Image (cartoon, helix red, strand yellow):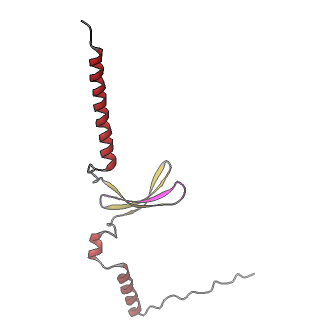
Amino acid sequence: MPVPTVGYLEVMGGLVLVVALILVMGWAVKRMGLVPANHRGVVRVLGGISLGGRERALLLEADGKRVLVGVAPGQVRPLLVLDDEHPNSSSDASQGPGFSSALEQAQTQIHQAGVKPATPTKPEEPVS
């Protein structure tokens, strides 16, 4: 009994076509962002700045703490750890005064206390 190779080739070709179509559609959906991603990770990047060609400073938030880290090729070093929440978050902005009002309040307190601002002095001339 002869084996119908044309039938097997059609089935295998159709199977490869269906698998390739599934892979392409999965890639396209992921690329377009149609699938909601779970971005509730432990560490969030709040901001960053480039310090040079290959160095960066990043402000990270993890477990309610903010950490300023320096990132260079092959190394990550913590520079500063802050325990309080991010100052520009919406909860902080609604709870406390802004920077300008806090500055005005501090200036008023200094003025009421009678503290005079420091006057710049001339640097001493070197003795020859």
Find the magenta span and give its range. 52-63
Q: Residue furthest left?
A: 1
Q: 34 or 57: which is nearer to us?
A: 34
Q: How many marks?
A: 0
Q: Where's residue 70, x and y in %? A: 46, 57
Q: Where's residue 18, x and y in %? A: 28, 32
Q: 127 or 80: which is nearer to us?
A: 80
Give me the residue at 26% from left, 70% from top: 91
Q: Where is the C terminus found, in terms of image quarters?
A: bottom right
Q: 125 or 13: which is nearer to us?
A: 13
| Left/right of residue 112 with respect to residue 72 in the rendered view | left
Give me the residue at 26% from left, 51% from top: 36
Q: Where's residue 54, x and y in %? A: 52, 54
Q: Where's residue 20, x and y in %? A: 32, 33
Q: Is residue 107 above or below residue 2?
A: below
Q: Quadrant of residue 78?
A: bottom left
Q: Is residue 99 above or below residue 88?
A: below
19 is within the stretch colored magenta:
no
59 is within the stretch colored magenta:
yes
Q: Residue furthest right?
A: 128
Q: Where is the N terminus found, in terms of image quarters?
A: top left
Q: Quadrant of residue 95?
A: bottom left
Give me the residue at 30% from left, 61% from top: 64
